[in-house]
Structures are given as C-alpha cells and as structure tokens.
Image (cartoon, helix red, strand yellow):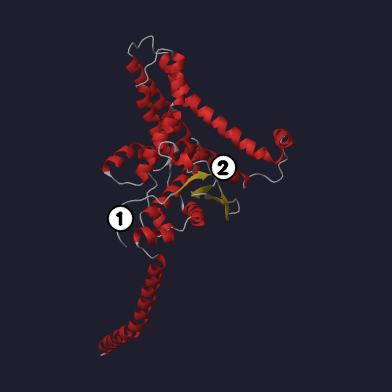
Amino acid sequence: MKKKKIRSSGIGGQAVLEGIMMKNQDTYCVAVRKPDGKIEVVKDAYQGHANKGWKKLPFIRGVFQFADSLILGIKTLNISADFYAQEEDAPTAADKVGEKAFGEGAEKVLEIATVSIAILAAIGLFMVLPYFLAQALSKVVASDSLLALLEGLIRLAIFLLYVVLITAMKDIRRVYMYHGAEHKCINCIEHGRILDVKNVKLSSRFHKRCGTSFLLFVMVISIILFFFIRVDQPALRLGLRLLLIPVIAGISYEIIRLAGNSDFFLVSILSAPGMLLQRLTTKEPDEDMIRVAIAAVEEVFDWKAYLKEEFDFDVDAYRELQEYETERERQLEEARSPEEDGPEFEAEDEEQDAEDE
C-alpha cells in the first residue's frame, strides 16, 4: 500500500437520534438502531443549493453549503425521530392545522420554519447579544478597538458556554458518542484502513472537517472582521455585522475545506483549537454504535474503491491472502501434530520404564 498525504474522502455526516446520517455528493442515508436492536437504513437523494453554477465559486459556496447542511440536518433528525414516535399517538391540534393549511406540503413548511427559527436564534445569541453587551461597556471603555475586541471575546465566551451546557445534558451524551463514531469511520477510511469495527475503534474521534471546528472558525473570523468596522452609527454597525455573516461563513468553509485536504503543519495549527473543542462534542462510541456508522457509510460510499484509488490497496485481494495464510497455517499445524506427538509419547514411555526399574 503506497503512502500519501491525507485527502478528504468527500463524505460527511452528523449524529442523529440513536444513529448516523452520512452524505456523499447528492446521496444521503440515515442509519438508526431501532428499539428492537435492529439497524434500519433510509437512503434518499438531496438536491441542495451548493455546487451549482456560480454558487460553487470559492467563498460563495460556503454559504450555500452551510444552508444545505442545516436543512438536511433537521430533515434527518426528523427521520430518526420517526423511528421512536409512538404509532398510537394521535395527531396534535398543530398537526391538524398544518395539514389543513398546507396539505402534503406541511412537512416541508415545518422544515423551513424550523431552519428559519434556528438561524434567527443563532444570529440573536451569537451576533446581536454580544454586540449589545459590549455596547453596555462603552461607558467605561473609551477605545473603539478595545470595545470591538471585548465584543469578540464575549461572543466566543457565549459560544463556549453554550457548548459546555449542551454537553452537560445526559441525553446529549449518546448523540456525542454517535458523533464520535461518525468521525472514527471517516478517519478510518481516509487513513487507508479497512472499514471494520476493530479499525474504527483504533481511529481518532477528532476530525478537521467537523462542524464544531467550523463554528469555532466563525467565531474567531468574526472577531477579526468586526474589529476593522469603524462607523459611528450603532444601527449601521449592527447592520454591517449581520451583512458580513455570509462572508464569515464563506471564509470559514474554505479554511475547513483546506484543513480536510492538507496535513501541512500551519493548517494543523489552525485546526488545533477546533480539534480540542471536539473533546467536548464527541465521545468514544461502543461497538453497536460503530456498526450503525459503518452501515451508514457503506450505503452511500464505496470505500473499497476509494482505498484502491487513493492508497493502491486492494481490500478483496488482501482478505483472500489473509484467508489463504490462515488456512495454510492450519494445515501446517495439523501436519506437525502427529510428528510432534510420537517422540513425546515415546519419551514418556521411556521415563515410565525407568521408574519401574
């Protein structure tokens, strides 16, 4: 197997309720461990908005990739939740109103509403709130540069506090274990190893292309860009911050993309804080979780072909060789056994005769 630098396999995913979502190009699947212990896999196509025409240009594609990830993430969370929904539950009043107003499109409307609320909540918590908290300090902080720096530090502190509080929730721990299983599977493949439980367990649960790292880059890059905004009107300052969010997302995506395709030491240094933060957002999975993650990967990605192309490693030929060597060793062991038993028994008989004399 030839050595080569790390290269992204192109697959990505996320943890869902008792399972994993994996996506490769326009195909995604959700693998879930059902209450009866069986693994259920749902596969479908997702035609996103990114990588089409001008939307695939650098620093622009990141905005649409982020939007697609958010939409698909909520969609797959709903899919995994359906496996645990009680069949006997009667439709709620909200369900009836939605079906009456939007018909078959009610689910689509709900997804759009959920994504919109999530985006607005994130903007309010991580962009607007830090700005007003920093402005409250303007009476005691005369320097605009220092005030901008304080705003950035407040934003970063809120983000880290949010991650810590989420991590402290007991129900989230299993989601983070599945998150770790997702990373381990991708790392296993991208380091040229056969995708099985043993190799996945030995792989790292930290990955440079993780969404956690992306969000941390968003926080840091916002500090840098907002530091150079110099306008007097408070409303205009806030407006510019909101307008720069797509720019921040675009830059962060390009950094994450670069990190996933390079092992250059400067890139590794840039990725280090995000990898460190993943110690909170990923946990070591058990073998059952790893099997769910493997099922999700194999549904959307031909990892054997990938290892052959990228590492010149023929998995089937390797396994045949292993089976041949195992069988050969067994045959040799059987052939040696009678020869070794004969002299040993003769020696025992001689020792017995000597004792009798």
Measuring from the top left, give residue 279's x and y in whole percent. Answer: 39, 40
- Residue occupying image coordinates x 38% and y 49%: 8
Q: Residue furthest front?
A: 53
Q: Which numbered marker is on residue 4?
A: 1
Q: CA gap, disc 2 to disc 1?
A: 36 Å
Q: Is residue 120 above or below residue 276?
A: above
Q: Which numbered marker is on residue 77?
A: 2
Q: Earlier in the sequence, mark 2 or mark 1?
A: 1
Q: Which numbered marker is on residue 50?
A: none
Measuring from the top left, give residue 338's x and y in whole percent. Answer: 34, 85
User: Can residue 193 be seen here?
Assistant: no
Neighbourhood count class around disc 1 (C-alpha, 10 Å): few under 14, some 14–19, many 20 upward: few
Q: Is residue 169 above or below residue 354?
A: above
Q: Nearer the viewer, residue 137 or 167?
A: 137
Q: Is residue 236 left or right of residue 75?
A: left
- Residue occupying image coordinates x 38% and y 37%: 277
Q: Quadrant of residue 164?
A: top left
Q: Nearer the viewer, residue 53 or 191?
A: 53
Measuring from the top left, give residue 274's x and y in whole percent. Answer: 37, 38
Q: Nearer the viewer, mark 2 or mark 1?
A: 1
Q: Nearer the viewer, residue 348 or 95?
A: 95
Q: Nearer the viewer, residue 109 or 215?
A: 109
Q: Quadrant of residue 252?
A: top left
Neighbourhood count class around disc 2 (C-alpha, 10 Å): few under 14, some 14–19, many 20 upward: some
Q: Are marks 2 and 1 in contact (CB under 8 Å)?
A: no
Judged from the image, the secondary structure of the residue bearing numbered disc 2 is helix
**Three-letter residue code for mark 1:** Lys
User: Can residue 302 be seen here?
Assistant: yes
- Residue occupying image coordinates x 42% and y 42%: 210
**Three-letter residue code for mark 2:** Leu
